[in-house]
Amino acid sequence: MPSLPECLATCRRDDLRAIATRLAVDDSTLRTKPEWITAITAFWSTGPRRFVTLAALSPAARTALGRLLHYHHIPRLLFLAEFEAIRPARGGYRPTVPPWRDPVTPAEELFYAGLLHSGDTRPLHKAATVTLPDDLRLLLATWMAEHARPEPVNVALAPPSPPTWLALLHDVAHLLVFLQGQTLSGVPLRAGRWLTADALRSFNRRLLRPEPEPLPRSHKRTQRLRYLMFWATAAALHDQNTLTPAGWDWLDQPAGSQLLILWRALQDASRDLRMAFALPDGWLPPPWPQPLWHALAAAGESFTSTTLAAAMLADGAIATAYWFTQFEDIPMLEDMVEDLLAGPLLEFGLLETLPGAAPQMTFYRLSSLGRWLLLTSQVPWPPAPTPLPPIAWQLASEQLTIDLPATLINRGLAEIALFAERVDPPQPAGDLCIHRVRLTPPTLRRAAQADMPFVLLIDSLDAVGVSLPAQAIAQLRSWHAHAGHVRTGVYSVLRTADPAHMAALHATEPLRSHLIQLLSPTAALLDLTPAAVRPLIQDLGFAVDGEAAASAHPPPADAALWLAGQLYAILRRHLPLPMAPPFADLDQLLARLDPAQQAVLHAWRDRLENDLQDLIDGRTFTAPANPSDPAQWIPQIEEAITTHAWLVMLYFSPARNLLTRRHIQPAWFETRRGVLYVLADCQEAGAVVTFRLDRIQELQRWQENPTAAGLPIIA
């Protein structure tokens, strides 16, 4: 920092003489710059009248002096924008009263008192920043503390407030669940990011920290609800109401990982995204917000928006021009910083407010979460798990109610909510919350119409620890099976008397490529007419019975386009594809085909969806915790194939990264890419599906009679 003599050396000769005249240290013997510098320095070092000069400063000049004490260097244009211009001692005008005799602005008062100087080696009118002489700061700070309104110092730190991260994670997760429910109901977001007024009220009532009602029509005007949507969007957890793969993965993460994902999204959010969600700093270009994070990481035990703004201005890594091109004056910078501290940073849980400050000033400190995230980029979690009480459920005639005690909404609960009427507002129960979920026939039919498979519900119930008896599963499946839409068509069906014959046909090319879907171990859909498939079967040595009526093949162009559009829609569930499928146009393509052709295409669509899921399972890098030896399951499965018995299996699903309980009736073995699979009729999936033997964790004979439990058996 420059001393007073060094600062005075940057002044012009006329300005030095004017300062000396103002301080009444000029006389007829002083003629040169060094002489005036010596006289002015002596005045402020030991002169008895220096305190009289300070006392004569106007209130506005004292405010400017306080600003200079807070900010070691202030961009000159920002300072002058707030405290006005300085007229030079000698210029092209002849004022009636010279500026050093009657200063008219706060900046002039300080300059002609010898206190306001250039922050570099250039004259003040060319300098980038302004400052106070370093050797006068202690004197001026002491005088200001005695004669100006003091700011609170040594603020007593309050005990840490309850952590807000729990409410943050719970409410962001609840937002994802709610958005997915809006998708199933066909309610879009306004402008791609705002809920409708009715949906906003419904969502607010389900939060751990709801906003007070009445709410405005949009959460753009509701601070916390707007921030929840911002964090979910910045982390790419949803796309136009639909959860992305990153969103489902986020729900599967422990609390610490969830917080880190949201924190990095807050750090890296683009300017456009910050502007879209009306954040206080949304208009600032790069390198913002990096100066804010650097200043917070270096902040002391307590700070205000003023001290934090001062730390950012003193950051030498940011060019001075950045500040005076983005802000009109210092108060504008301080107001923006205060809005950030009291807004998204406080809501995120990075900060805590402190008591004891003046009414017009808020003191902050970093919370324990803020210190960990800013200083280590990690969190000291997960904590020791809280023991969970038993899960309560009740199946009535038209409703299944489940009370799930949990700290946070996890992926299993989020997936159950896709089939639910609603998830009631959480009820606190000690360190936990009770989430009440209601499943009804209409909600399961709605899920079925949205292509939510029934096995997803069963897996999700298993994931959260809900084990339903066979009768309850049968009741839920009946609700799911009676979906609102019914598909009809003319299909070619291949039937065999023995599952072994179907296994032989299924394993033989070219017939295998025309078996679209296995309906049971003895029945399959074909994409060929009976007349076309007859010679293929006869070439394999089988006798063929049945109709041989001919039917036209689907026109290749319309059929291929419709199937491509359907595959795009399936892929969009797994990838963030840029636009929604043109369903209306696809329906027109399908309408051009006759019923038999439509039936074939629908069957092909189902097969492609199953093949894609198998591909995802095969490429998923998550392996079971304990891969099993396939050989140990073969004898038991072979016996079940021979006796048509049902087995209970604990199976690892790699795409969902969890263990699921399945009830299966094995049909035959298959080998794919050197890996052994079993084809089985699965009760939970309601279809014939394949299972890898090395993912089976437990296997035993099912003692319960599925027919007695009301479960259909496909023979």
Image: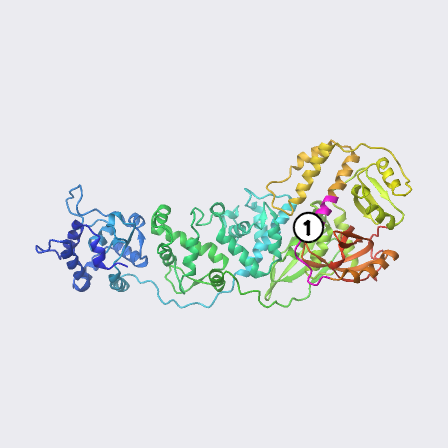
Residue found at x 28% / y 64%:
145
Element at label 1: helix
Main SS type for the magenta part? helix
Residue found at x 75% / y 44%:
607
The magenta stretch is 607-627
Count of picture labels = 1
Vertical order, 553 against 386 (above or below) = above
**Crowdedness near tag 1: few (<14), some (14–19) or many (≥20) residues, C-alpha within 10 Å:** some
Q: Percent x, y for residue 312?
A: 38, 55
- Name of the residue lying farthest toward the left: 28
- Name of the residue lying farthest toward the front: 674
Q: Quadrant of residue 138?
A: bottom left
Q: Quadrant of residue 435?
A: bottom right
Q: Percent x, y for residue 302?
A: 40, 63
* Membership of 58 in magenta stretch: no
Q: Which residue is mark 1?
A: 616
Please name the amino acid that badge 1 sits on.
Answer: Ile
